[in-house]
Amino acid sequence: MTMTDQPETAKPVDRTAEQVDHTAEQVDHAGEPVAVYAAGAIPWRVRSAELEVLLIHRPRYDDWSWPKGKLDRGETMPECAAREVREEIGLEEPLGIPLPSTSYHVALGPKIVHYWALKVPQSAVVSPDGTEVDATHWCGLEEAAALLTNQTDVVPLRWLAEAHRRGELDTRPLVLLRHAKAKPRASWTKAEGDRTLAASGVRQAAAVGRLLGVWSPERVVTSPWRRCVDTVRPYIASANGRVKVKLDDRLTEASHKRKPDRAAAAVDRLFDKRQSVVLCSHRPVLPTLLASFVLRCEPGLETELPTEDPFLAAGEMIVFHVPVEGPARVVAIEQFKPYDD
């Protein structure tokens, strides 16, 4: 079966018509509860001006597929996808745009697999683990569609191919993050900017750090108030000096109350810098920040953004995917809340 004669269900869906859903909520699959959640990625590269993807061979099933695996307890879907790619083929590259999920039946019942694109640098070394994966194969899209054992795996492949055609496959993430849970405002007697994270917020911050590692932002821009700084601190520590950090007074609640347009300008700087960034701020500032992102969204994408207070829960984030080349515009949106105990 070639890429040009797939069944109707395998055709790429217009991004404005259907949101790619990578939440881990319990949903019905033809009336049955989902038995297995899994996640993975489609590794891709451009070689001699041609798009190539990487298939894996699994000896246990004697099939050709994409790197993927079951969700572990305490993981988000993106973390699962990144871990499976790392464990199965040794790649630790950031995840790219979300791709459609696939679903099929296994012994336990319905299984849903969530996918992301994953750009592989030319210098990267692919190393099959030898157990789950005994071989890999770079190939073009037509060959990949023909080799894939499970034809539902062609669905995310077609979406990836269409994103490449539109110039929306090679992207960088801009992450908008609300700080983790802080100690109650009413019981805090010191300066508001010094209010610290609650014990649950400290655990949230650790989870935030792990989740941000999936996209590996190069820069951290944060309100200098302590609850924001402490939220991004675990990610900064895990990056071992590989990220640049900026404390931006425009993102504090006090500055925003006086001059909200300055907070909006901070978002414009994210796009101008053309780097991957996480921006951490406060709930009262979020409407202004989100309004600035809306101005950069491709038509229809803005409907995926929250519109009501509190906009994001403590420690929750939105990932805006922006093409590396061309006009600075948002072509995909994801929203995640790290594992919360």
Image (cartoon, rainbow, N blue to C red):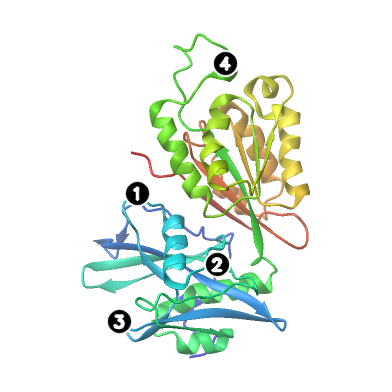
Q: CA distance from mark 2 to mark 4?
A: 41 Å
Task: Quadrant for residue 141, please give it.
Answer: bottom right
Task: Quadrant for residue 62, please give it.
Answer: bottom left
> Residue at label 3?
60
Q: Earlier in the sequence, mark 1 or mark 4?
A: 1
Q: Amino acid at mark 2?
A: Ala
Q: CA distance from mark 1 to mark 4?
A: 32 Å
Q: Earlier in the sequence, mark 3 or mark 1?
A: 3
Label disc, if present, on residue 288 of the rendered structure: none
Label disc, if present, on residue 192 of the rendered structure: 4
Q: Residues within 10 Å of mark 4 (few under 14, many from 20)?
A: some
Local SS, label 2: strand
> In the shown orientation, is residue 150 left or right of residue 16?
left
> In the shown orientation, is residue 41 left or right of residue 244?
left
Q: Amino acid at mark 3?
A: Arg
The x and y percentages for residue 50 are 68, 82
The x and y percentages for residue 211 are 48, 49
Whether label 3 touches label 1, CB < 8 Å: no
The x and y percentages for residue 146 are 48, 89
Whether label 3 touches label 4, CB < 8 Å: no
Q: Amino acid at mark 1?
A: Gly
Label disc, if present, on residue 74 of the rendered structure: 1
